Structure formats: C-alpha cells, structure tokens
Image (spheres, rainbow, N blue to C red):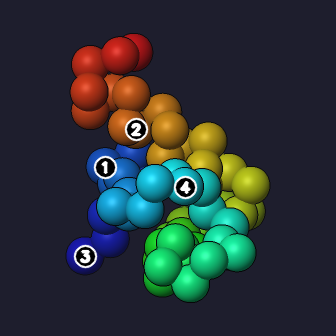
Amino acid sequence: MKIEMKHLVIESDSPRGRLEPAPEPELDLGGVTRVAQGIAKLNGLSMTEIPQRNQKNLETLCGFS
C-alpha cells in the first residue's frame, strides 16, 4: 500500500526543525533526513520539494491553511 505525501508529516523532537545535518550530535536529524529521502524516492519528488510539502501538510493538520 502506498501512502500519498499529502497524508504525511515528517517531524522530530529536535529544536532545530530543519532537514539538514546538525553541528551538535544531540540535534542530528540524520534519521529524519533519511526518512525524507526515502519518501522523496518513493514518490518521485526532489529533496527540495519535501520540506515545502511537509510544511503545507503540517499547516493543514493544525488548521492553519
């Protein structure tokens, strides 16, 4: 079964909140980045599209759009 990107929100408890490597190991979002890369690959999206779509999905989930 394939879950469409519009139904996903990628999140972490990290205070950084970005999909990029962190300078401090405790703030490393490598796992989140790997998940985002997998989602991008499965959905035929670029890694630049994932944060944009993720933000839109989060805003929809929270009722901000």
Q: Nearer the viewer, mark 4 or mark 2?
A: 4
Mark 4 residue element: loop
Which residue type carries mark 4? Arg
* Mark 4 or mark 2: whose residue is earlier in sequence: 4
* Mark 1 or mark 2: whose residue is earlier in sequence: 1
Which residue type carries mark 3? Met
Mark 2 residue element: helix
Mark 1 residue element: helix
Q: Are marks 4 and 2 in contact (CB under 8 Å)?
A: no
Q: Are marks 4 and 3 in contact (CB under 8 Å)?
A: no
Residue in the picture at 32% in, 71% down: 2
Give the camera-side residue of 17 and 15: 15
Residue at image mark 2: 57
Expressed as whole percent of the image width and height from the top left, the position of residue 50 reads 60, 55
Instruction: Classify 10 Å Cα crowding around label 2: few (below 14), some (14-19), many (20 and above).
Output: many
23 on left or right of 8: right
Expressed as whole percent of the image width and height from the top left, the position of residue 44 reads 64, 67
* Mark 4 or mark 3: whose residue is earlier in sequence: 3
26 on left or right of 64: right
- Residue at mark 4 to residue at mark 3: CA–CA distance: 32 Å
Is residue 35 at all visible to an observer of this figure?
yes
Residue at image mark 3: 1
Residue in the picture at 35% in, 16% down: 64
Q: Are marks 3 and 2 in contact (CB under 8 Å)?
A: no
Q: Nearer the viewer, mark 4 or mark 3?
A: 4
Residue at image mark 4: 16
* Mark 4 or mark 1: whose residue is earlier in sequence: 1
Q: Are marks 3 and 1 in contact (CB under 8 Å)?
A: no
- Residue at mark 4 to residue at mark 1: CA–CA distance: 23 Å
